[in-house]
Image (cartoon, rainbow, N blue to C red):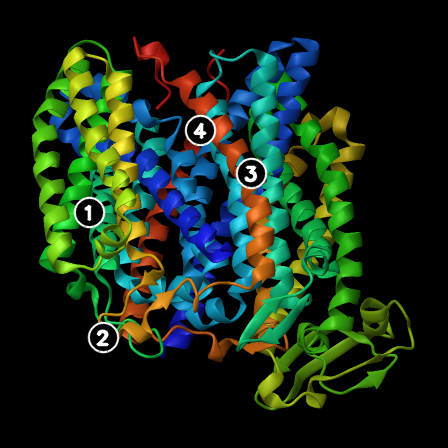
Amino acid sequence: MDVLMLSRLQFAAATMFHFLFVPLTLGISVLIACMETAYVRTGKDVYKRMARFWGKLFLINFTLGVVTGITLEFQFGTNWSRYSAYVGDIFGSLLAIEATAAFFLESTFIGVWHFGWDKLSPRAHALSAWLVAGASNLSAVWILIANGFMQNPMGYELRNGRAELTDFVAIITNPWAWNQFVHVVSASFCVATFFIMGISAWHLLRRQNEEFFQKSFRLALYVGLASTAIVVAQGHIHGNLVAKLQPAKLAAMESHWETRKSAPMYLLQIPDEKGEKNLVQALPVPRLLSILAFSDPDAEVKGLLDFPASDRPPVTITFLAFRLMVGIGMLMPLLMLFGLFKRDALAKYPLYLKAMIWAMPLPYLGMQAGWAVTEVGRQPWIVYGLMRTSDAVSPIAASQAGASLVAMVLLYTLLGAAGAYLMFTFARKGPVDA
Amino acid sequence: MLETIWFLLWGVLWAVYFVLDGFDLGIGTLMPFLAKNEYEKRVMYNAGGPFWDGNEVWLLSAGGVTFAAFPQAYATMFSGLYSALMLLLFALILRGVSFEFRGKVENDTWKSVWDACQVAGSFLPALLLGVAFANLFHGLPLNEAHVNTGGLFDLLNPYGLLGGVLFVAMFCLHGALWLSIRATGELKDRAMATACKLWPAVLVLVLAFLAYSFVHTQLFGNYLKNPPLLLILVAAVAGLLLSRVYLAKGQAWKAWGGSAVFIACVALFGVVGLYPAILISTLNPAWSLTIHNAASSTLTLKIMLGVALVFVPLVIGYQIWSILTFSKPIQSEHDLEY
């Protein structure tokens, strides 16, 4: 394998592993802050116990998120140095703002929160929880603005052999970034709420700490219901934006080869990338693709064949990842709705509770698939329409990139295993301390 | 002018990173020598416990500012030091996780594995940062396209290694002093005794490093042109001397402060000596990266300056508050989280 492929795999490994932890952090930090606020307001001990129990799981998750995030900050320099030099004027400043405005706040107050249970007043402690939650979500704003520049570059001019900043306001108001922010944050709340509901369901099935886990389940249910609704509804708007700004990605998402008006969507489809067609396409839903892409049943949807082969993203991965994401996106609100109707009699529906345990990985999978659509679907560009991924890679030896990739995958696998073991152990143990 | 401001800020960020992460990396390195039992080990984990994460963000910011203010330098530095940086990052990952994971399972093997991660994950970064910065002070074999033509083992030259050993010793002294602030009883006594033993070693190492720098690098050029700048060196020496004086008086906080000034000024001494270069090419001075050919556009530098002026004072404010609130001496198990 060449440096380009190794670097792409390494970046995929580094981001995807990092993004196993980020969404839970974004969502559960807010929910824990809510629990602490409830404790401050009502003085009921159960809320404090909730914050402590979920907080313990949160900390294990948070640590893995933090340490794997450090690698990412330097990946652009190590493996994508030509990219860094070319767009650093814009992209670098966004990362630097993320660190100064958000990471410091998040990382300082996670220590305050962790060590402050007995040293701070409940009110001050709840405030530190809100600062961690706010800062985590603020970091998402900045990294998605940075990613937004790669997806839909604006506010720059090509000067001195690189992209230079000309309009900072355009960059931070990039519609792509803000759509992505809503999408990612609402999906993160799906991850966090399914996480809390799954673990709560496990304990409710065993009839242990019922009040505690009913309250947890219910809080997650209400937030989760709203999040699944937002992620799906906004996903549609997001799809329209992709259709407008990155038509090749949209065509790959649907494995849509020939340009046509009133395009149908095929429920069953098997892409044949080499043959530039679909091996199987059956069960059409008339005009659905046109509606999904442009909110107009008659709209023309450009097919992959209208793009030069060198400008097309990998179709199979983008297509499968998109289907997986959408499938999960459809399933999640149904699970939430069922919970809403039966919320007062959960114990009577052990099958539902079991399903909620097994549903915990779903939003994680949806999240990973969504990012695969976003990033693989942007190929062959690293910055859409501006710089190709193949022009961005560092002039390093393949042996270096290969060795670091192997080391990273090994290290992350071990860490992931240790982290999962701890999560399981503490999730099963339930709330123990007062 | 803007470029010069950013160059100085860049140096300050690295200096603050060394001062802050320096003490917890030092404590981690010293753990096998100072902790005699499980309780003392836990005290050592907790001594830096509330801070390690916030401290590490200074590294992220230093990296981020290199990227934002001098993108070409970021590109060259981190792709050129690829293997060393990867080692540094993996070591920091293991160290960070060891804080959180170690105490979660009551099993001796589990704990000793994470202890090994903590020690190696503290020692290696200290060493690698020293090696890397000594090599930056001397320069790298950058070619015309600003690509480092040397490999990992070229960094391990005598000057680089001396820098590495100096950093390890500085951080250990700094860590021992921090532990003197936070530990009580025998562990505190042992930490202070260790600091006393490390101090002469640090003095000898820093003098050797300065002498070696004088003959081996161009760092002193700026100082000979502008002698008032030598105040940085004076401050470094004063910080180191004061740390010994206060150590003898048993005033751990002030001794730590002296050591902090010392570390910051050693880093700044090197950075100011580099000016206006960020990365010196040892092959041809024209191929060096300087604030002139590596800087971002004026607009970016201006916006970033605004961001820094707003947020950095805030960060310093709440980090000082956090340090003051959470650095009381650890009296008993009740004070331990990790």
Residue holding disc 1: B127
Disc 2 is placed on an element classified as: loop
Numbered tag placed on residue B311 in the rendering: 3
Residue holding disc 2: B283
How crowded is the residue under tag 2: few (<14 C-alpha within 10 Å), some, or many (20+)?
Answer: some
> Who's the residue at 54% across and 27% down the image?
A54
Q: Nearer the viewer, mark 4 or mark 1?
A: 1
How crowded is the residue under tag 4: few (<14 C-alpha within 10 Å), some, or many (20+)?
Answer: some
Relative placement, left or right, of B297 versus A180 is: left
How crowded is the residue under tag 1: few (<14 C-alpha within 10 Å), some, or many (20+)?
Answer: many
How crowded is the residue under tag 3: few (<14 C-alpha within 10 Å), some, or many (20+)?
Answer: some
Front in this rendered view, residue B334 or B167:
B167
Q: Chain of mark 4?
A: A
Amino acid carrying label 3: it is: Phe
Q: Chain of mark 1?
A: B
Find residue B194 and report its horizontal and vertical position in percent.
11, 24
